[in-house]
Image (spheres, helix red, strand yellow):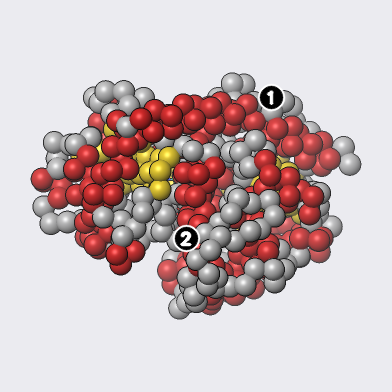
Amino acid sequence: MEGKRAYNRGHVLVLPYPTQGHINPLLQVAKRLAFKGLKTTLVTTLSSWRSMYTESISVDVQTISDGYDDGGFLKAESIEAYLNRFKEVGSQTLAELIKKQKSSGHPVDCLVYDSFLPWALDVAKSFGLVGAPFFTQSCAVENIYYHVHQGLLTVPMTETTAASLPGLPPLDIMDMPSFISVSGSYPSYFAMVVNQFSNLETTDWILVNTFQELEVEEVDWMTRRWPLLRTIGPTIPSMYMDKRVTYDMDYGLNLFKSDGSACLNWLNKRAAGSVVYVSFGSLAALEVEQMEELGWGLRRTNSHFLWVVRSSEVDKLPNKFIEETSDKGLIVAWSPQLEVLAHQAVGCFVTHCGWNSTLEAVSLGVPMVGIPQWTDQPTNAKYVEDVWEVGLRARPGEKGIVCREEVERCVREIMEGERGEQIRKNAIKWRNLAKEAMDEGGSSDKNLDEFVAKLVFK
Ligand code: UDX
């Protein structure tokens, strides 16, 4: 891809945590920086690179090792073992890559790294590079983790009353990230999200995947604490976001094989706003009973539905579900989600409220029904329903499962109800604000320009 101009300096390495929800936004950051004239290189782990379905991408790619080159995370005996080995082997191989770039005539000036990998800053600093963590999750969620890091929020929370944290609306326990509300939940991941704040005092920037207008008070509070914080989102393929930049429709690096033409051909036959799109992202594993309730709930809505059921989840579908719903539903293993959300046939997104999915729906103006599963998703669902008012959160019943009647109620409310009408209006408002943030001179675009200027003219 040709940038607007090419600078003589400013080679940026961009290092995501190797899961889909982190590769996508950081790949977009890399593409944006390249568009602005910097040489950018995306750095992935060899294991994830080997399992990727690559469409054409417009930035260079280099690999480092996580210590599990054949199979990655799946080959580790535990999450803790994986994260420790990634830190050890990743630090060494990242240092080797930086040296190699220098000897091949492309010295590195800056490392933008996933905030889940704070050890990358130590590597950057050992070479005198500019170091910039990129927070893939919302400012609200990062604010909560920061309070845990500072010992200002006791975990696990026990009260069912609202927590009052500065810069945030009142949050019930069910609105908190799962690591905080569920005792002993994934201790290694919990340590990882809290550790994001372990060495921030020595970073040169803090970049966040949100936009100013979406989280006004949250960004304001965090910026007062961290003056180097800049919002640069939503990190979504350019053609959806910025009139000047129309080089990409999709992210471009998929860990799953997409059923793209099947989805789009099927959507092309549906009326505007008539389809419910359903996806739970790249990681969530639903209980068998939840799959059953969700499936029959979708059937009860009587709407057409396009449901992404990853191959690891497909055995959980109710018996004969595909046959019995083939007049209404299409089930695929992976979709080109951006193109699906942007399709005029889609009227509602039933989502786990992963931060990328949430930002994508907000940015494309698609109303949501949130069925959050874990990590930051409950907090995102809270904001979807109560703060931005762009969707509803389905309430779990007994055993923590959202029943079929509740799925039906929420979808019908969005598709047919009075509240749905207001939600659709709100969704358009937020879509316009997201586009403005990324357009030339918008809040996120200006922040990225500032980052580039400091790098090339320092
Ligand atoms: C995880 C966490 O769940 C999320 O909350 C966190 O903020 C980032 O890491 P994941 O669960 O995969 O990510 O969800 P999400 O953040 O929504 O990311 C999924 C990505 O995969 C999105 O960019 C989405 O567009 C893409 N996707 C998903 C597809 O391209 N096709 C699909 O069929 C499903």
Amino acid type, residue under disc 2 in the picture: Met
Q: Earlier in the sequence, mark 1 or mark 2?
A: 2
Q: How far separated are the C-alphas under marks 1 and 2? A: 38 Å
Q: Residue furthest top?
A: 243
Is residue 250 left or right of 414 when viewed as pictured? right
Residue under circle 1? 440
Q: Is residue 64 above or below residue 280?
A: below
Is residue 390 left or right of 369 when viewed as pictured? right
Residue 92, percent across and down?
A: 68, 68
Q: Quadrant of residue 95?
A: bottom right
Residue 354, percent across and down?
A: 47, 51
Residue occupying the point 39% across, 33% down = 419
Q: Residue furthest right?
A: 458
User: Closer to the camera, 269 or 417?
Assistant: 417
Q: Is residue 299 above or below residue 270?
A: below
State the quadrant of the C terminus.
top right
Q: Is residue 74 above or below residue 19?
A: below
Residue occupying the point 73% across, 45% down = 220
As helix, strand or loop, the secondary structure at mark 2 comes to helix
Q: Quadrant of residue 2?
A: top right
Is residue 386 left or right of 315 when viewed as pictured? right
Q: Residues within 10 Å of mark 2 (few under 14, many from 20)?
A: some
Residue 276, percent across and down?
A: 30, 37
Residue under circle 2? 174
Q: Residues within 10 Å of mark 1 (few under 14, many from 20)?
A: some
Tag of residue 132? none
User: Closer to the camera, 73 or 106?
Assistant: 73
